[in-house]
Each structure stands twice: as structure tokens, then as C-alpha cells.
């Protein structure tokens, strides 16, 4: 499967991730056209330049917010403009950001990547500032530049057809950083919260090397691996530059290659029976658990003593996220006890997303393979739903057309 390995020897930020992906082969034109689907292109412009950090050539991405229209400059031949125009810096809540992403014409895969990153940021910021995640005012993270960074990263992952992300030890830096709330120790509180369960260290500069956005990408999408996985075969390496000039190369190095995606890790199933809770809470609970790193969450209807209807909540989590999931279950439900069952092993099919053109538009399909053979093809529900609504046709017709054409395409 297509795999990324993040070498965060000088930290990680959203724009560093974007720059590295551009060096890995994501076309700037593709990034531009996809970002325009957010319908906020009048608020920002992106500058991409080739820079050198301690002798390493890297791509530097900068999102600029301008208050007034600014014509294209002609005195910067090294800069490639992706977009222009803006009218000021906007702070947005999680609800605002979700609306922007949901209402866009981005693929369901891109939306899922982006929303998962924002969800873990909302949970971390909410915990730090003692507020519900949906009410968090994102300040820097909710600004247009971070929306573009995060959605841009999602676009790049979709284009590269990445199925697995590993990350090594993360250099967070040291000292203090100026935030909307004042001076904060490095790593900033939200960054520290997001990187729980990952191995971090400080080296090279009294600066913030890992930002909340960079930490959220790791938290939402990556899995720790102390080194490149044993079966990983690197095909390309990309370097994304940070803003700082340091004694060490201020770059994020990303390896792109193929691997089985397997690592040695302990998995646990957390179970509890609940018969006295408002069922409306389960939707909220699912979001919290997935944001905390749960691999899967499901409900089973059961009968308890005196034939009382109840639900058995089951959560699959690895050892790094087990404690966080247990804490959420105790805080958000009425349970007073959780069964912890260690899973000795789990067999996984290799999965990748493949696009197919139906009679009504493009649909993403999840293609799963095991032992070198395709075992299932599943069209994405949200893509089919959108096309069914847009063209006033039955959803099952779109779904079947996507399945039939993807099967024919893959033989």
C-alpha cells in the first residue's frame, strides 16, 4: 500500500507538510483547482517558492491574507501564484469550518481527512480551554491560512493515494511562543495534548518547531514507528521548508513508498453495557472517540437483567490511545465499569481509494485486497448521495453504476 513516513527532525507544520507533498509530485495546478472548491479563494493567496535550508532544497508554501485586492506582482519570478485576493483575517469555530468543508465540492476522501484533522484540534483546544469542542474559537488554527493548510494536506494525500502514514520521534523545539492567549511554553498546550502517545524531544533551537496544525496531522492520521518499517520501499523523498532559519535544516522530510502497513502493536477492545443513557448522546460519543484515536466504535443491542433493553458499547483502540478512550467513556456515558479485552491479532485487507466516472459524475470507491487479490469494491456513500441529489436519480442507480464500472476498470 502507498505509505508515507514523516521524518520530523525539525518539527512539522501544515505548510511544511504541503511543501514536502509538492516535491513528492502533487501538481500545483491540481492543488489550486481543488482549493478553489472551498469557495474562500477571495480571502487568501498562496506563494510557493524553492528555498535552501542548510543546503537542502525544499519547497516553501506561504498562505497570505490580504485586506484589499492586490494585483499579480511581476518582480518575483521564483514565486508561483496559486490564488489571489483577500479581505482580512477571520476567526472561525468548528461549526463554521465544518460548513465550509461540507458545502464544498471536494471529494468525500478529502473532506474526511480534513475534518478528522480539525476534529482532533477542536478536542485538544476544548480540553485546554475547558470548552466544548464545537464552541472552540480557533484563533490562529481557525484562520483562513490554517484551513488552506489542512485542506491542502488532505488534497495532497488524496492525490498521492496514501493509505498509511507513519511518524518517528517528533522534534517540538523549546522556549516560548506568542499565541492569542499570550506567551505559552513550547510545545504549546494544544500541541502537547495532541502529541500524547507519540515520542517527542527538543533539539536545535529555542523555537516552536511543531505547530498545532502539524501535531493534529500526526494525531489524526499517523502511527508511530521508531524507524522506517522493515518492508518499506522508498520511491520518492520530499522536503517542505519551515519559516525559520536555524542551525539545523528547518525542513520536514517525507518518504513516499510501498509497505504492507503492518507494525507490531497491541490492540484492545473496550466494552461496557449501558441501559440508562439518552441514546442521542451516542452520536456525540462516536465523534469524541474517533477524535481520540479509536480505530472502530460500534453498538450492539442486548437484553440485561429483568429483560431490560440496553446497548453494549464496543471500542477498538491501540495501546497508545486506550487510556484516552477509557477516559471519554467514563466522562461521556453513564457506565461505571469497562471490560478491557486484549486482541491477540487482527488480519487486515489492503485498502486504497480509486476514482471512477459514472453517468452522473465522479465517485470514489474503496478497493480492498488480500493475499494479492481484490476481495471487495465499495462506492463511497457520500459521493453517490451527492450525485443522486444533484441529478434527481435513485442513489442505488449511482451506486450500482459506480460499482459496475469500477469492476470493469479493474478487471
Image (cartoon, helix red, strand yellow):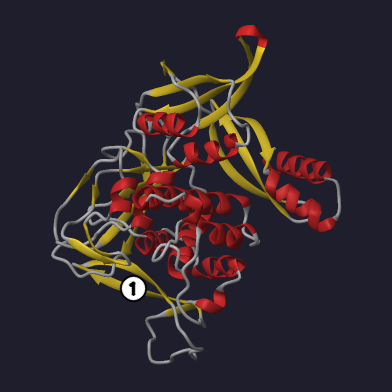
373 over 24 or under it: above or below: above
Residue 17, quarter of picture = bottom left
Residue sitting at x 13%, y 65%: 247
Residue sitting at x 38%, y 92%: 75
SS class of the residue under badge 1?
strand
258 over 64 or under it: above or below: above
Residue 12, quarter of picture = bottom left
Could you say where residue 135 lies in the image, as x and y percent from the top left?
49, 55
Q: Residue furthest top?
A: 306
Total count of labels: 1
Residue sitting at x 75%, y 48%: 385
| Residue 235 in view here | no
Mark 1, other Cα within 10 Å: few <14 / some 14–19 / many ≥20? some
Residue toward you, 341 or 346: 341
Q: Is residue 351 left or right of residue 103?
A: left
Q: Quadrant of the C terminus?
A: top right
Could you say where residue 6 lies in the image, as x and y percent from the top left?
33, 49
Residue beneath disc 1: 50
Residue toward you, 333 or 184: 333
Q: Is residue 32 left or right of residue 379?
A: left
Could you say where residue 368 lies in the image, as x and y percent from the top left?
59, 34
Residue sitting at x 41%, y 24%: 267
Residue toward you, 124 or 64: 124
Could you say where residue 114 lies in the image, as x and y percent from the top left?
51, 54
Amino acid at each position: 500500500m502507498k505509505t508515507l513516513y514523516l521524518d520530523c527532525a525539525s518539527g512539522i507544520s501544515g505548510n511544511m507538510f504541503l511543501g514536502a507533498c509538492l516535491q513528492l509530485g502533487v501538481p500545483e495546478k491540481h492543488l489550486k483547482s481543488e482549493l478553489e472548491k472551498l469557495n474562500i479563494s477571495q480571502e487568501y493567496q498562496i506563494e510557493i517558492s524553492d528555498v535552501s535550508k542548510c543546503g537542502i532544497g525544499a519547497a516553501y508554501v506561504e498562505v497570505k491574507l490580504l485586506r484589499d485586492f492586490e494585483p499579480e506582482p511581476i518582480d518575483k519570478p521564483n514565486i508561483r501564484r496559486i490564488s489571489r485576493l483577500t479581505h482580512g483575517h477571520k476567526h472561525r469555530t468548528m461549526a463554521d469550518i465544518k460548513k465550509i468543508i461540507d458545502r464544498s465540492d471536494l471529494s468525500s476522501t478529502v473532506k474526511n481527512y480534513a475534518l478528522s484533522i480539525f476534529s482532533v484540534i477542536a478536542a485538544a483546544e476544548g480540553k485546554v480551554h475547558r470548552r466544548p469542542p464545537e464552541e472552540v474559537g480557533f484563533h490562529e488554527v481557525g484562520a483562513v491560512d490554517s484551513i488552506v493548510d489542512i485542506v491542502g494536506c488532505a488534497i495532497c494525500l488524496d492525490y498521492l493515494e496514501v493509505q498509511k502514514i507513519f511518524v518517528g520521534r517528533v522534534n517540538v523545539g523549546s522556549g516560548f511562543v506568542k499565541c492569542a492567549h499570550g506567551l505559552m511554553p513550547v510545545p504549546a498546550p494544544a500541541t502537547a495534548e495532541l502529541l500524547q502517545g507519540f515520542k517527542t524531544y527538543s533539539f536545535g533551537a529555542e523555537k516552536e518547531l511543531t505547530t498545532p496544525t502539524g501535531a493534529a496531522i500526526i494525531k489524526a492520521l499517523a502511527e508511530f514507528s521508531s524507524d522506517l518499517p522493515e518492508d518499506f520501499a522508498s520511491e520518492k523523498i520530499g522536503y517542505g521548508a519551515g519559516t525559520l532559519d536555524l542551525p539545523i535544516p528547518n525542513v520536514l522530510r517525507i518518504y513516499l513508498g510501498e509497505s504492507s502497513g503492518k507494525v507490531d502493536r497491541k490492540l484492545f477492545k473496550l466494552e461496557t453495557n449501558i441501559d440508562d443513557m439518552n441514546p442521542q448522546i451516542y452520536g456525540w460519543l462516536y465523534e469524541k472517540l474517533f477524535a481520540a484515536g479509536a480505530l472502530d466504535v460500534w453498538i450492539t443491542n442486548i437484553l440485561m437483567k429483568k429483560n431490560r433493553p440496553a446497548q453494549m458499547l464496543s471500542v477498538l483502540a491501540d495501546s497508545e490511545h486506550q487510556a484516552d478512550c477509557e477516559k471519554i467513556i467514563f466522562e461521556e456515558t453513564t457506565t461505571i465499569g469497562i471490560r478491557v479485552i486484549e486482541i491477540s491479532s487482527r488480519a487486515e485487507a489492503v485498502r486504497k481509494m480509486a476514482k471512477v466516472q459514472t453517468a452522473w459524475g465522479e465517485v470514489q470507491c474503496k478497493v480492498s485486497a488480500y493475499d494479492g487479490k481484490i476481495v471487495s469494491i465499495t462506492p463511497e456513500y457520500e459521493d453517490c448521495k451527492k450525485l443522486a441529489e444533484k441529478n434527481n436519480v435513485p442513489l442505488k442507480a449511482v451506486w450500482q453504476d459506480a460499482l459496475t464500472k469500477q469492476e470493469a476498470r479493474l478487471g
